[in-house]
Amino acid sequence: MSSYAQKTPEAPDPPVLSRAALYVLCACVLVAQGMVAAINLLIPQLAASSLHPSSSELLWAVDAYVIVFAGLLIPAGALGDRYGRKGALLAGLGLFAAGAATSALAATPAVLIAGRGVCGAGAALIMPATMSLLVTLTPPARRSQALASWTLAAGLGGLAGNVGGGLAGQFLTWRALFWVMVPLAALLALAVARLTPRSPERSDSAPDPAGSLLLTAALAALVYGIIEGPPRGWGSVHVLSAFGLGAVLLTVFVVHGLRAAEPLLDPRIFASPVLRAGTLGIAAGFFGLFALFYVNSQYLQYVKGFPVGLAGVAIIPLTVGMAVMPKVGARWQDRHGIRPVAGGGLALIGAGLLLVSTAGAATPYALYAGYLLVISAGTGLCAPALTAAVLVGLPAHRSGLGSGLNTAAREIGAALGVAVVGTVLASGAGTGHSSAVDAAAFTSAMSDGLRVVAVVLLVATVFVVLGASGRPPTAQAPADDEDGTRVARADERETV
C-alpha cells in the first residue's frame, strides 16, 4: 500500500531531522563502517598476542564481522521498517557495544571471533536504520544533500578504520581499539535517544522469517566463499561448496519471494533498471575502493618502508574528495540526473586505480597521494547518485529495506574486491615481502591486481550508465506496470 494511502488529511506534519541529529546518524555510520577495516592493521599484533591464534582463526577474527554484517543487512532493514527505525538503531548500538566489550575481554580466539560477530549484527541494524531515518525525516528538497552526508560518512568509515587501526597498532594494543568502541557506542545511543525523532511511517507488511533466514544464509555462504577463495583456492571443495550452497539458497529465496504474499524482498523490484544500475554501481565502487584499501597499507609498509601508524595516516588524501564531492555530486544529480554523475564518478575511480597500478618503490608519496585524490573525487561524486538510484526503486515505507540492499551491495562488493586483488597478489608475490626481491614481486603483483580490478569496474560502469535514468529523480514520472514490478511509484517523490 502506498504511504499516501496510509495518511489522512488530519495527520500532523511529520517530524523533521535536525542538523545535530543528522551528524549523530552519520557518526553511527562512520563507526559501524570503520570496524570493517580497523582490525586489518592489527593482524601482526594479534598474531603475536597471548591468544596465539592460528592463521585460520586470524582470518575468522577479521571476517566474522563482515559475514554477519552482510548477511543480516536486508532482514535488519526490514525489521526497522516493521517495528521502528529508531528502536532498531538503539538496539544495534547496544549489540555493537556488547560485541566490542566481548572482543576486548577475549581470552581465546573463539571469544574474539564471537565478539566480532556480535559487533557485525549490531552494525547490520545500525546502517539501514540510519539511512531510513534520514530518508523519512528529511524534506524532499534537502534529501539529496542529506544522502550525500550519509554516503560521505560511509566512505570515511573505511578511512577512519585504517587510521584508527594503524594508530592503535603503533601506540596502543588491539584490546584498546575494542574498549574505545564501548563508551563511544553508549554516547551515540544517548545522542540518538535525545536528538532523533521517531520515524512516522512503518511498513504494515507481515514479517517473513522464512525469507529472512534464506537470504541471510545465502549471503553468508556467498561472502564466506568469496573470503575463503584466496587462501584455500577457488577450486577447492570448501569454496565450491560454499558457492553451491549460496546459489541453491538464493534460488529457493527467489522462488519463495515470487510465491509469498508478503515477501521480505520481492525479486520483481529488480525489474526496475535504475534499481539494478544503482545496486551494481554501489557494488562496483566498493569493489574498487576496498581492493585499494587491501593493497595500500601493504604497499606503504613493504615497498615504501612506512611504519604501521604512518601507513594508516597516509591514506588521508582519500578523505579530501569524499568530503568535498558528495555535496557537489548531489547538486549535479538534482540538475542533470543520476546517469552522468554516477557514470562519471565510477569512471574516475577506475582511472585512479589504473594510476595507482603504476606506483613502485621510486614513486614519490606526493604523486601517489595525487592518485588517491582522483579515486576519492570519483567516490564522492558517484556515491549519492548511486544511493538515490537504489532508493528511488522502493516506496518510502520500505526505505529500511532499500537501505539494507544498498549496504549489502557495498559489503559484497568490498569482499569481492579484496578477494580478487588478494588472489592476484598471492599468485604473483606469495605471502612474504620483507626483502627487496619480495617487495619488487609485490609491486608487480599489485599492478596486475589493480588493473584487473579497474577493468572490471569500468565494464560495470558501462552497464550502470545504460541502466540509470538520465533524468533527475525528482522529475521522474510514475512508471507504469509493464515491467511487472510491484513497487508503488507514486512514492518516488518521497524517496529522493
Image (cartoon, grey):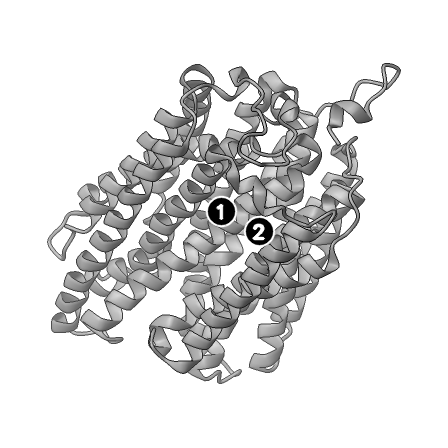
State the residue in front, 215 or 231. 215
The number of callouts visible is: 2
Q: Quadrant of the C terminus?
A: top right
Residue 473 lies left or right of residue 358; in this view the side is right
State the residue in front, 394 or 328. 394
* Residue 120 visible in rendering: no
Label 2: which residue?
Answer: 32
Amino acid type of the residue tagged 2 in the rendering: Ala
- Residue 37 in percent (x, y) is at 46, 57
State the residue in front, 277 or 41. 277
* Residue 193 visible in rendering: yes
Residue 267 lies left or right of residue 426; in this view the side is right
Q: Quadrant of the N terminus?
A: top right
Residue 494 lies left or right of residue 321; in this view the side is right
Label 1: which residue?
Answer: 157
- First in sequence, mark 1 or 2: give its number: 2
Residue at disc 2, secondary structure = helix
Amino acid type of the residue tagged 1 in the rendering: Gly
